[in-house]
Amino acid sequence: HNPRHPRFFVEMTTSKNTSNGGKLKKTYKFMDEEVEECEEFELIGEDPVVLQNANEAENDKDTLPCRTLEDFIIFDANKKNQVVSLDEIDVEGRELHAAGIVKPMFLTDKDIINNHEYIVDEIETWIDEQEAFGVVGCPLIAHLSKFKRKKGDKSKKPKLAHSGDTSTIKTKRNINPSLAVRNPTCVTPFIHDLTKGLFVRRLVTVKHTNDEETQTENLQKENSLVNEIVVKPVTHCVEWHGKMVEHDNNISYYRSARVDDDIINIGDVVYVRNDESDKPWFAKVMYMYDDPKEGKMFHSRFFSHGKDTVLDELAGERELFLLDNCADNNLDTIVGKVNVKRLEREERENFSSDDTSFYFYRFWYDETYASFEDVYSHEDPTKEFLYCADNELCYSCENKFAAKEKEKGPKWNSQDENRQECFEYKGVEYHINDFVYIIPDNKDDPYTIGQIIEILVKGESFSLASVGGKMGLKSIGGTKIIVVLRLLGRYDDLTTEKITTNPSASHRDVITISKTIKDSRRLFFTRETIKECADRLEGVCWVDHKNNISDLDAYKDEKDTYYVDLIAPKRSSKLEDMCLFDANSISKCSICEEKRRKHQNLSIEFYDYIKTNNQKLRAMDIFSGCGGITVGMDQTGVIDTKWAIEFDSSAAMTFEKNNPNSIVYNQCANLLLERAIAEHGRQEELNDLKDFLGRKVPSMPAPGDVDFIYCGPPCQGFSGVNRYQKADDIKNSLVATSLSYVDFYKPQYFLLENVRGMLCFRLGGEQDGIKIKGGIKMGVIKFILRSLTAMGYQTRFGVQQAGHHGVPQSRRRLFIWGAKQGLYLPGFPQPSTCFCKQGSISILLPNGTSFSYNKRTNGHAPLPAISVCDAINDLPEFEFINPHLTYPATEEDKNEKRPFKQIIVPERGWVGDMVTKYDSGPLSEYQRQCRKDSESLHNHVTRAFNQLTVERIVRIPMFPGADHSNLPEKLKPWCLSDPNSAASRHNGWKGLFGRLDFNGHFLTALTDINPMGKTGTVIHPNQRRIVTVRECARAQGFPDKFVFLSDKDDVKDMHRQIGNAVPPPLAFSLGQELVKSLLKKFEDDKGKKGKEKSDRIMYEVWVDLSSFQDL
């Protein structure tokens, strides 16, 4: 603090102020006893600041003490010490200082012990948000984490034993009005009862049928049934019941046994004594046998009670989940039989029995991925067993054997003579002439691509007949199979020129970039061959000659497709050395060619069926925003988004503009759900309702009209970016609204999107300052999964990184799939593009295990990462004109000739062109995708700034990573650079007013593109301006034909829409997983129809033959 600065202030008036309304301006009076808080200042009770060496900065963030400031006041030295409120501190041009009573903060061993859980949680959150994963292994973190595990996971309120209490004052903050005036959270009775009062905010229940009361009464009754299982300490009598059914290898098999007073049959569910707990296991008897050594035995497949799954505290008391977990046990470990029912697929939880030993099941539970699948597909009576003996059939064993075989290593395939040069590894078949992905040596590089030209064992040619065998597949170990590969190069590696930058460049320098067209799908043949172990292969791709492809763009739109037309004449060649080669000279695997042809034909038939029979999934997008998910989903060709619900008028206008065939409800989702239930559930006539644009709200669709619901409930309450989490934030309870839509409409599929922070949100907690204490760990996720399974939906959840799916930015999002029983539950896509700073996409479960759906090795992927240059270097170039407010224009400034269009920046409105033409064709594959069906370029505008901000933006030097710290002294914002400001505790706010790197990626798109914002690296890589709306849209993967609107013609509105959206390429990748599920179902149904037709023909032939014989 400045030594002249006061701790108290007086009110002073000026004639100008009093004449214009009589408002008093508060200013500061200097106090003689004030002390400057500098490096020499010593505070009683605090360790002195000791610099480790002479070169260490005196304001280094690691050496500065942490203190409390009470009775403080903030003022602006540039405005004659005028008092500034907290909501005014971000105004440009201020020089802010503070004065108050400073006190030391003590930290003792006891503080660490009392708060270790909280400290570790905070550190883990910081590591995750900052992606500072390098500190995870440091001794302190490891010790604290170990200590936390020993103590358990119950979090405590942080409490510093020796710090004084500080009073806090609530201050007015800027809030988004559209998020502040929502109606109360509206839910159906079924969802309301599942919440168990865990949402702090009151939920309004809306009944839609009379039987709702019965349904909820039964659910409450189910929750009130407390099972008290009496475990018998000893089993007195075990004997076989009935005749032996089979004898094999000295083992006798039986169908029934008597255990004390119970007759146990194959297929019964029993209690099995648990030596580690007084709670027995639930197990299904698969087969029984008498072993001369072991005695009377049975093999059982276990169930898990819901409380032992991820559902934990929110599980139903009566529900069990089938596992792939089985074991052999003595029959005398059976405690008794259990009354267990497998629910029918359309059967809801409904309990009329007071039998406390009654249980039910309907789902199989994956203990690794915490997912729930239709149990019918895991107890399929028509299943063909490949590994289990006829007398020892067990679905769990079969799956275990299959998984082990898959992981054993490559297996030779000799099932038919046409596959004599083929092996299988990790579920993928490899043949001679296959094009394959090879794991490269450098982390985060795209796969190397090669063609198999020979298969060897220990360096010798392999003849299948020499291994032979009737088993068809013979495992010979992962490192024994060697493949000889001819390498292909990536065309872009020949043409791409590295963008050179000079870290000492000034703002006057120009960064030039090549306008060479890049194509990540174009390869060339090299003359290089290598030998690799089979375990270095990670999948196959399809490569064809350019002349063999009729529609190159459509071909490149497929996954894992590449084209070639060039060959290197020698081992190492430049682009000018490349030669064209004949299309017929490329060798292909005939087996894979036939497989590809069949898949293409099936896909054509599938899409023809969808189109001819009008079978697209009719979708509803709730909390749609501007429609990021809708863009990606509609691109799949199987989804038609007919309805969208969005509270914000600007976002609703944008959605409507880009989806003219959709009905957009610019109203509150809670109110619309209530009206839908009233109209279609209770058959009431509704009064007219206006939306926020003054238009009449159309009728909501009826149950049965909606096949697919996807939604992204507002995420601010869960986001790690939002420091001020509130337990009663209405946005947190909108998850219950989303699930109530599912309960009412009962769609076939459901997808929920949210920030990764939802995984950590504690449901049912209490507000404690800016944090939430207590509550159920991972509670929101548990509630969603419990609600979906209770409604009969299969479900799985995972975290996806947008950068892995062709988006040039880091953006991790949580997704939760739901699918009705009887359908295939969609999975999660594998990365298609590399991304160096992916962050953690693993999910830590309450039991301490973690999982991720990413199966690729070390960040590798088929395609290279999308860079900032790949995304935006084709867009028209322009720059801000320097207003020279602080530094007058020099002769050099006046004579400067820039290669880009120069625009004067107004203080309001926007800068650039709302509609313009492209200056060039697409220069990358990413740009080709973005520019599909777009003739004009929309929204290539930036927001306007005041002259001081413009001058700062223009003066940022021309090299990647340059920021406010590189500005001339007079232009450096005090609050970002002064040692006495908060900047010293935040690494100097590095990155604010930051210049992007053409070779790098965008930071996570936030809702406010501001160089002084939370992610202030928003200045164009080689132009003197911030990025435009269109460039931000490119960063998210929006197509150029997508137009952004605002009801206030506000560019910030458009940025907010983009920042809140799900990147369309990520949504498309998820949609492709849904397509796989639908295609598989289509193929199953087609097979069933074919079998029925075949059976009918055989029956008709039999009838004809019978008639002929009668003659």
Image: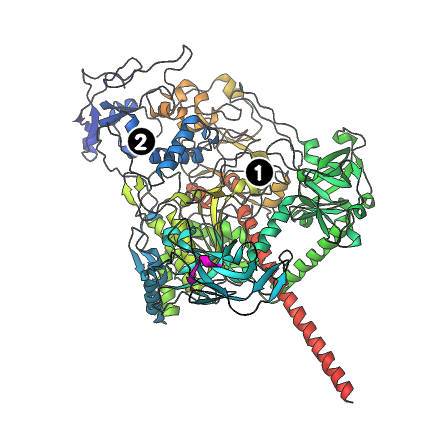
Any part of residue 662 in sight: no
Residue 997 found in image quarter: top right
Camera-side residue of 829 and 793: 793
Q: Nearer the viewer, mark 1 or mark 2?
A: 2
Label number found at residue 570:
none
Check the picture and name the quadrant holding the C terminus: bottom right
Instruction: Give the CA separation, mark 1 to mark 2.
Output: 49 Å
Horizontal arrangement in the rendering, residue 773 relative to residue 487 (left or right):
left
Q: Which mark is residue 871?
A: 1
Residue found 30% across the figure and 48% down from its top: 728
Residue 480 position, x and y percent, is: 72, 38
* Residue at the bottom extreme of this rendering: 1111
Quadrant in the picture for residue 273: bottom left
Q: Which residues are magenta?
A: 331-338
Foreground of the two, 497 or 465: 465
Task: Assign a secondary structure to mark 1.
Answer: helix
Q: Amino acid at mark 2?
A: Ile
Please report whichever mark, 1 or 2, sits nearer to the chain's N-terminal start: 2
* Residue tagged 2: 113
Q: Position of residue 1056 (x, y in %)?
A: 43, 43
Colour pattern of the rendering: rainbow
Graded by Cα atoms within 10 Å as few (under 14), some (14 to 19) or many (20 or more), the crowding at tag 1 reads: many
Q: Magenta stretch: residue 598 in it?
A: no
Answer whether residue 333 is magenta in the image: yes
Residue 844: where, in percent of width, then height? 45, 42
Does residue 179 appear in this view? yes
| Quadrant into which the N terminus falls | top left
In the image, taking residue 478 as reference, residue 934 lies left or right, namely left
Residue drawn at (58%, 28%), measured in percent from left and top?
899
Name which residue type carries label 1.
Answer: Ala
